[in-house]
Amino acid sequence: MDPKKRPTARELANRLRTLNSSTSELSARDLMSDESHRSYIISDSSSSKSSFSWTPPVRAITDGDIKTIKRHPSKKGKKSTGDDIALMIAARAGYADIVELLDPTDKNGVTVLMRAAERDDIEAARALIPLQKGRQTLRKININGVWIFRRGTALMRAASCGHAEVVRLLVDHEGGMQDSWDWSALMHAAEKGHATCVKLLAEKEEGMKTTRKWFGYLPGTTAFDVAKKMGRTEIISILSG
């Protein structure tokens, strides 16, 4: 990123204060970049407090200093409040490579945006969409009791889980995409009976069809056909209107 365009620590602090931290139910109250005040206090929904230090790795994130971050790797399998905040700082600053270091795409091609979509983390999804929209998985993944096959997207994960606000954020970026069995996000929402998600997706995906047979669904299957097979009367009404 051009240094002239890169956000300053103060600008990042201001951005962080606006976060509705749905990931960890935390909100930033006071972020101070002055050298004499390197820590700030955050509070969660139960009003308990913890200290988050303005550590070298966090400073490196605000500077886009990937070499320093690589020298301070997170402990594998252990995530903290600080890790979540650091990830949000990096995402909002537009540092895709740093986001990947902090929360890597796994062997199945599942990205941090896909994970945020699955757990209904609206603010994380909002921050990550510019960096990871349109990515597709490398293998099939079971989400909410539904197999989303290779080339699955964050939108499909959100739709399958019924996370309407995340679907609203993603539909303009990933609407119209299909997995390796030609299923769309709308088909997944219809199968699971998520009416609000169906309404959000219908305009972009209602006419989409499969091209192959899969588990009793014939080639040419639409989201309407899926709703009929599953007996989703509300979805049938929405899609036939």
Image (cartoon, grey):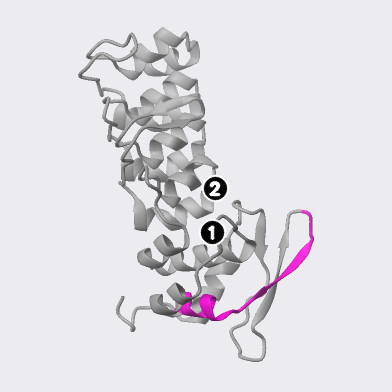
Range drawn in magenta: 46-62
Nearest the camera: 35 or 202?
35
| Displayed quadrant of residue 14 | bottom right
Disc 1 on helix, strand or loop?
Answer: loop
Q: Position of residue 186 (x, y in %)?
A: 37, 27
- Dot 1 and dot 2 residues touching (CB under 8 Å): no
For the point 36% across and 63% down, the residue is 96
Crowdedness near tag 1: few (<14), some (14–19) or many (≥20) residues, C-alpha within 10 Å:
few
Q: Amino acid at mark 1?
A: Lys
Q: Which residue is mark 2?
A: 121
How many labels sit on residues?
2
Q: Nearer the viewer, residue 81 or 4?
A: 81
Residue for point 67% across, 86% down: 37
- Distance (Cα) linking label 1 and label 2: 22 Å
Question: Does residue 175 show up magenta in the picture?
Answer: no
Residue 195 shows in this picture: yes
**Outermost residue, left side:** 211
Residue at the farthest bottom position: 36
- Under circle 2, the secondary element is loop
- Residue 68 lies, in percent from the top left, at 44, 79
Q: Amino acid at mark 2?
A: Asp
Image coordinates of residue 110 in percent, x first then y, are 40, 45
Q: Which residue is mark 1?
A: 76
> Would you place residue 107 above or below residue 233 in this image?
below
Work out whether 10 lies above or below 146.
Answer: below
Locate residue 109, reporting x and y percent: 35, 45
